[in-house]
Image: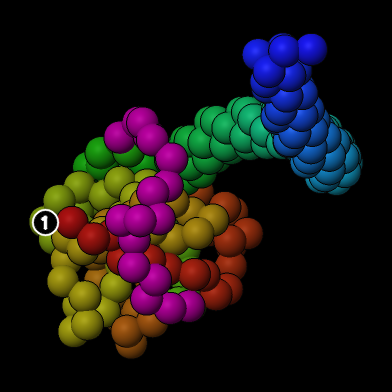
Amino acid sequence: MSGRDIATQIKATFNFRKNMIKNKKRLRILITTCVILIVAVVGITYYSKDIVVEYTEKHEELNIAKNDLEIEKEKVEQEREQVLSEAEIIAQTNLYLVEENIKLQESLKLAASVGVKPQNYDEAEKIESAVDYSKLEYIGEFEGTAYTPSVEECSNNLGYTASGKPIIAGVSIAVDNKYWKLGTKFYIEGLGYVVAMDTGNAVKGKYRFDYAVFDRDYALKLGRRNWDVYLVKE
């Protein structure tokens, strides 16, 4: 074997070993990379499992909260409908009470105007609206009686009040003008709106009034009693 052949074999052997070393390095790198990837995948899988569990729990909690909100919404809607229904009933009741209040005041004025009429008198104006307490100021409990503009009670039947105006049954009241100016308007619960138009010897004191009617029996029936009185705020 020539020297050239030997050199060629040695070179070939060297190259083979060199390639083997390179392949071993590559294999180590590949194995290390695979191990790292496996560990990473396992870690990600484990972590992802916790995330999935947590996400599932959160999703279930959100579904429960959503269902609770739907239930509360239905309750609110039911309560709203109930409140609206009650409000409608109250509104209808208030309307009925307003109408009844007007009818009552009209009836009282009509009852007061029935009887023997004096020479001069006016008719009470028609009631157009119910009592508006926001325009009233409660001034106390008054002792009230009723009188007729007759000769027996007023020494004449002319029908003129101390204010100089004709008497109005169911509207005119006598007061003590030391405390109340003639023309002052009041609201008396149970009698309606009245005006201080007259005075009388028996009407003394701040908390006293005499209610004008045309029928003696009606006046006696009203008798002497206490009434809640309000001042009409102009």
Q: Position of residue 158 (x, y in %)?
A: 22, 51
At 54% from the left and 56% from the top, the residue drawn is: 190
Q: Position of 166 compared to 127: left or right?
A: left
Tag 1: amino acid: Gly
Looking at the image, the residue that sits furthest to the left is 164
Quarter where residue 233 is shown: bottom left
Q: Is residue 97 visible?
A: yes
Toward the front, the furthest residue is 2
Q: Residue at x 39, y 71 (%)?
A: 138
* Residue sitting at x 57%, y 37%: 94
**x, y percentage for residue 141?**
48, 78
Q: Is residue 30 visible to the viewer in this orientation of the structure?
A: no
In-image side of 191 versus 204 (left or right) = right
Q: Which residues are magenta?
A: 125-141
Nearest the camera: 216 or 96? 96
Q: What residue lies at 35% left-to-right and 56% top-to-bottom?
A: 134
Image quadrant of residue 197?
bottom left
Residue linked to disc 1: 164
| Front-most of residues 196 and 215 | 196
| In this picture, residue 222 sits left or right of residue 199 | right
Measured as percent of width and height from the top left, residue 76 is found at: 72, 36
Position of residue 141 in the picture relative to residue 12 (left or right): left
Image quarter in which the N terminus is found: top right
Please tell me how many numbered marks the rendered image carries: 1
